[in-house]
Amino acid sequence: MDQELALAILMSGRSALLTGAAGTGKTHLLNTFIAQARDQGKKVSVTATTGLAATHLGGNTIHSWSGIGVSDHLANNFFDRLSKTRREVITKTDVLVIDEISMLHDFRLDMVDRVLRGVRENDQPFGGIQLVMSGDFFQLPPINRPGEQGGGFVVYSEAWQELQPAVLYLERQYRQNDEQLLEILTALRNDDIRRHHAETLLARTEVELPDGDITELHTVNVDVDAINSQKLAELAGGERTYQQTTTGSKVYVENLQRSVLAPSELVLKLGALVMAVKNSPQKLYANGSIGTVVDFEPLTDYPIVEFRSGQQVTMVPDVWELRDGERKRASISQVPLRLAWAITVHKSQGMTLDAAKIDLRKAFVEGMGYVALSRVRDLDNLYLYGINRKALAVSPDALAIDEVLQRASSEVAKHYRPMLEEMKRKQSVPKKSGKKSQSGSWQQKIAKMRETYPKAYMPWEKADDDILKQEFLQGATIQQLSQKLGRHEGSIRMRLQKHFGEDIVA
């Protein structure tokens, strides 16, 4: 399915699943839909399954938004405890977005469904709200931890079966511009990895790394910590240590820590490569911004970081909170940084990296290999320590689900495509009254816009993307970038938000 049809279906008010391979533009389309829906006056609540994923869309976790928190079931007095503010948010919401849906347990989607029906006093699925889910089931699955209720993908939930969302399976690839890498990723999704695919990947273990720091992806935290510690030890000078402070019970603090990238103990030196792990309220940096520690503030000893934007910022402690409805269960205060020489594959989901060195020798769950390998645009910027069989394995559940989703998407396209074409045809026919159509056809609008912005509604090419990022970091304004790249200022702003985070672009 193409993006135009998928957007038209979303704008029709139909609850839907937006899916497709990594790099097919799911987040871009989701942002476009959110903007257009809000322009129509709809109240859109944007959420995701993890705190990190939520930052990509400027939203909240679905657990916090719905009030279910970290519980595995709704307490008997749940609705009695739910605050007036939370009730108002749920009642006024027209559209609920849940991103990275593959990581949400089936039973938690059922919990959200029951909350929305109860609060809105409406027995339709999700209380009559338009539900828009986005994600790829070939990427990381829900995490089942010891001592917690286990569950599977959301497609197995009762709420899913009753809702029967329209499946919008995007097919065009935008991230990868390398046919060889794209072929490997496609083979992974089809559980059809051949000898020559494996040999191509293994050849990347023998390629010499270029000069400069390249982010490394590892499957386990112990390796990430070891690399970051080693790199830190190689730097001269003394260490500075920053300890997190917490409030709340141990179990809630532990649950909060899973979505907080800042370590409980942050150790830094002059010259350390670091990553911001929260958006700056003053828009000085974004979650994921990379920089180097260049000094320490004399009075407080807080680190001064020069980000790749050229901005120098004194990094003071920030606060993360875990709420159950409106009730604060836990909080963590820490300098919002972590060492950035290495990160886990789990934390990389949703990122696009210019280059990466990846260690898949300890991959322990299906989807890890696919997520890691799909973070880069081409093989030339992919470097491997090694890879095991698990990294090349596909979840049988994901494979079966994907077949069903592709068929369902084809049926949806067959149903909606004629309706879209008819709507476009009617819009393009002039009215007999002689009055000019207020809306005009979609093609006419695009043609008119391209008189001013030649590349309006065209896919972004890597060369233009590189110019956009480079010149923005050098101080170019939205207006200047719009003129240079031939795109509307709104398109420029949205693309910058994709790369640098929503809060970094005014």
Image (spheres, rainbow, N blue to C red):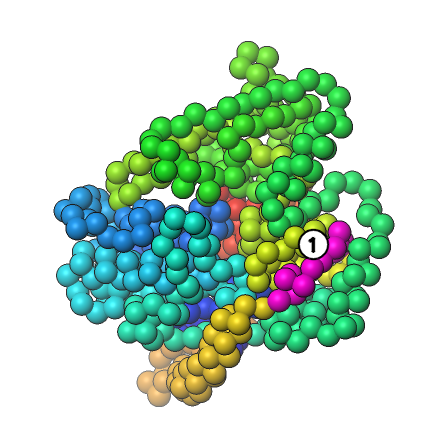
Residue 102 appearing in the image? yes
Q: Which residue is found at the position 50% from the left and 76% from the top?
A: 400
Instruction: Provide the secondary structure element on which disc 1 rests.
Output: loop
Residue 32 appearing in the image? no
Q: Residue furthest top?
A: 299
Any magenta on residue 388? yes
Which residue is at the front of the view, 102 or 130? 102
Q: Which residue is found at the position 50% from the left and 30% from the top?
A: 264
Q: Which residues are magenta?
A: 381-393
Q: Which residue is found at the position 71% from the left and 58% from the top?
A: 387
Q: Residue furthest front?
A: 147
Q: Which residue is mark 1?
A: 361
Any magenta on residue 398? no
Q: Position of residue 242 (x, y in %)?
A: 54, 23
- Drawn side of residue 417 relative to residue 381, left or right: left
Q: Is residue 298 above or below residue 243?
A: above
Q: Position of residue 156 (x, y in %)?
A: 37, 70
What is the three-letter code of the residue carrying label 1? Arg
Residue 172 quadrant: bottom right
Q: Position of residue 314 (x, y in %)?
A: 56, 24
Which residue is at the front of the view, 104 or 13? 104
Q: Is residue 247 above or below residue 33?
A: above
Residue 132 quadrant: bottom left
- Drawn side of residue 471 relative to residue 205, left or right: left
